[in-house]
Each structure stands twice: as C-alpha cells, then as structure tokens.
C-alpha cells in the first residue's frame, strides 16, 4: 500500500541515515582524539583502569625525579669519601716518611696539619642541598639521623598505594660511615667522634688521646717514638679500613639507585603501552570505518531522496 500520509520507506531511510550519522560522530571522535575509550561512557571498566594507571604513571615519574635527587646525594657523599680517603693515604705516607731516622718530623707535621685541615674542608663541602652524609650529629645531643632516598611506588593488590624508601643510617663510631660527628659552624672545629674524630691512646705522648684529625708528631717523646709511630700508623690504617667500607656501602647504594631508575623507566613505558592497548584507537581500522560510513551516508541520502520521490509519482495518476 502506498500512502501520502505515512511514508514508511522515507521513515526507514531516515532512521538508517540517523544511525549512520551517530556512528560517524563516534568514529570521527576516535580519529580526532586517537582514543577508542575517551570517557567513561565509551567503556566504564577500561576508562577506570586507564585513569588509575595514568595517575600511577605520574607518581612513577615523580619517583624517578626523587631517585635522581637521591643519586645526587649519594654521589656527593661518595665523592667526598673518596677525596678523604686520598688525603688519609697521604697522611699515612707522611707517617711512613717520619719513621726514618734523621727526618725533620716538625716539617712532616706541618704537612700533616694541612692535610688534616683539608679533611675538615672535604667533610663540610660534601653537601647537596643541605644534605651532608659525611657529618653526623654531636655525641650526646641526638641520635644520628637515618638518611633515606625514595626507591619506588607500589600499588598493592587491595588498591592501597605506598612509596618505598632505602635507608642509610649514619654511624658516628670509629668504624662507622661518617668522617666527623659534627663540625662547629663558627670555629670549624670537628667533634671527637666519627672515623676521623674518634681518639686512640698514644703511649707516653704529651697528648695521649689523639685522632687522625688531631694527630701530632711533635707530641711523641723520644723514648716512645717507635711505639708512638706504630700506634699512629695503626690508627690511620683503621681509619682507612672504615672509610673504605663506608665508600663500598655508598657505591652499593648508588648502584641500587641506578638499577631502580632503569626499572622505573621501563615500568613507566610498560604501563603506558598497557594503557594504550586498552584505550587507544586503531587508526587504520577507524579510518577505514570512517570512509565506509561516508559512503553509507551518501547512499542513505540517496535512498531518502528516492523514498520521498515515490509520493510525487502518485500525482501523475491524477492527471
């Protein structure tokens, strides 16, 4: 039946054209944004996962920055410790020189005194943005604070998040990992603890309690000189051993930070790729679909035109 009131063919063609238009709108949004899931209405589950993982990726980026800051602190401390080791080696060499008969020990002591001042300069200078890992706190004032560097960002299976850190405890003992327990800001005088500040007994010397920093060959008596030189060498050797151990710990921490930086970078890339698989649009597929919809739209317009023209043909029956 043909009706001029209700044009079923035109209605069907119009409905098809509307459906094609909606599909074109969706496809064009995918093409312009590059996203198959651009908001929650596209796919609530994938959109939620992608949004959460993008926020985690931003946190990982902040962790990478924090790791860079931590690496700078550790590298500064390591550079200072290495420089101090070289100076203490020089002091050891001067002591060996002073054991020879006929050597002017007062001249040797002048050189040692300059090296001792250099040790203080190194300890003070090994600071990065106010963080100094070679100087602790004065004995009896407070516990040596733990230093820490950010090492990771973790999302647990239950959805809770946390930032992990790596601790580096400062130890102000003679076998610890700081050069001095403290350095007076006004006078520049170091405290009496730490690897270089802890005192040992020098038998029969005019000053019996001496450290690597306060070592004074002029205080050795003639009667005990051989014993005193041996005690001084033992003290310096013990300090070198402790400093070498401390530098090894710093080196190990630096290596771990480097590995964590590399892992954080790879993890960030992995998350980015994973999110992309969930929400990114396949541009080859979308461009092909867009071309097909454009063709369908043209055909739909033509079909609607044909359906509307059928009513016009009825007029010829009344002529």
Image (cartoon, rainbow, N blue to C red):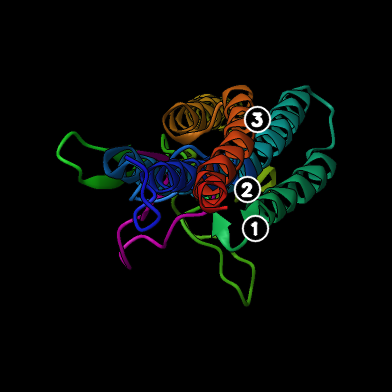
Asked if residue 72 lies left or right of residue 307, the reply is right
Q: Which residue is mark 2?
A: 219
Residue 16 in view here: yes
What percent of the width, then of the height, locates residue 92? Answer: 69, 28
| Image marks 1 and 3: residues in contact by CB distance under 8 Å | no
Tell me what residue is drawn at x 43 percent, y 40 percent.
Answer: 16
Tell me what residue is drawn at x 71 percent, y 34 percent.
Answer: 91
For label 2, the SS is helix
Where does the magenta region start and end?
134-153
What is the spatial separation of the Cα atoms under label 2 and label 3, in whole angstroms? 96 Å
Q: Main secondary structure of the magenta part?
A: loop
Q: Dot 1: within a 10 Å radius of its alpha carbon, few (fewer than 14), some, or many (20 or more) residues?
A: many
* Front residue (pair 120, 72): 72
What is the spatial separation of the Cα atoms under label 1 and label 3, in whole angstroms? 70 Å
Q: Which residue is mark 3?
A: 291
| Image marks 2 and 3: residues in contact by CB distance under 8 Å | no
| Image marks 2 and 1: residues in contact by CB distance under 8 Å | no
What percent of the width, then of the height, locates residue 71? Answer: 58, 40
Residue 251 in view here: no
Mark 2 or mark 1, earlier in chain: 1
* Mark closer to the observer (1, 3): 3
Mark 2 or mark 3, earlier in chain: 2
Query: Residue 124 — which label?
Result: 1
């Amino acid at each position: 039946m043909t009706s001029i009131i209700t044009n079923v063919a035109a209605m069907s063609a119009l409905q098809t054209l509307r459906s094609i238009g909606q599909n074109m709108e969706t496809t064009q949004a995918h093409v312009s944004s590059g996203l198959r899931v651009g908001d929650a209405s596209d796919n609530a589950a994938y959109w939620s996962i992608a949004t959460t993982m993008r926020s985690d990726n931003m946190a990982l980026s902040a962790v990478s920055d924090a790791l860079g800051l931590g690496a700078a602190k550790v590298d500064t401390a390591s550079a200072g410790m290495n420089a101090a080791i070289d100076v203490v080696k020089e002091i050891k060499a001067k002591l060996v020189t002073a054991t020879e008969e006929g050597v002017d020990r007062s001249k040797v002591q002048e050189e040692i005194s300059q090296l001792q001042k250099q040790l203080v300069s190194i300890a003070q200078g090994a600071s990065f943005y106010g963080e100094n890992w070679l100087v602790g706190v004065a004995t009896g004032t407070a516990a040596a604070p733990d230093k820490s560097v950010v090492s990771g960002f973790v999302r647990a299976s239950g959805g809770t998040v946390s930032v992990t850190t790596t601790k580096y405890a400062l130890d102000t003992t003679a076998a610890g990992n700081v050069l001095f327990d403290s350095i007076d800001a006004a006078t520049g005088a170091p405290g009496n603890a730490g690897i270089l500040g802890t005192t040992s007994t020098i038998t029969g010397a005019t000053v019996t309690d001496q450290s690597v920093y306060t070592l004074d060959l002029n205080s050795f008596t003639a009667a005990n000189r051989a014993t005193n030189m041996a005690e001084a060498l033992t003290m310096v050797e013990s300090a070198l051993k402790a400093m070498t151990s401390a530098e090894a710990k710093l080196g190990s921490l630096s290596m771990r930070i480097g590995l964590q930086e590399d892992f954080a970078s790879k993890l960030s890339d992995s998350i980015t790729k994973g999110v992309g698989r969930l929400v990114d649009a396949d541009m080859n597929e979308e461009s092909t679909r867009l071309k097909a919809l454009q063709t369908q739209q043209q055909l739909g317009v033509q079909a609607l035109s044909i359906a509307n023209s059928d009513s016009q043909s009825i007029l010829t029956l009344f002529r």
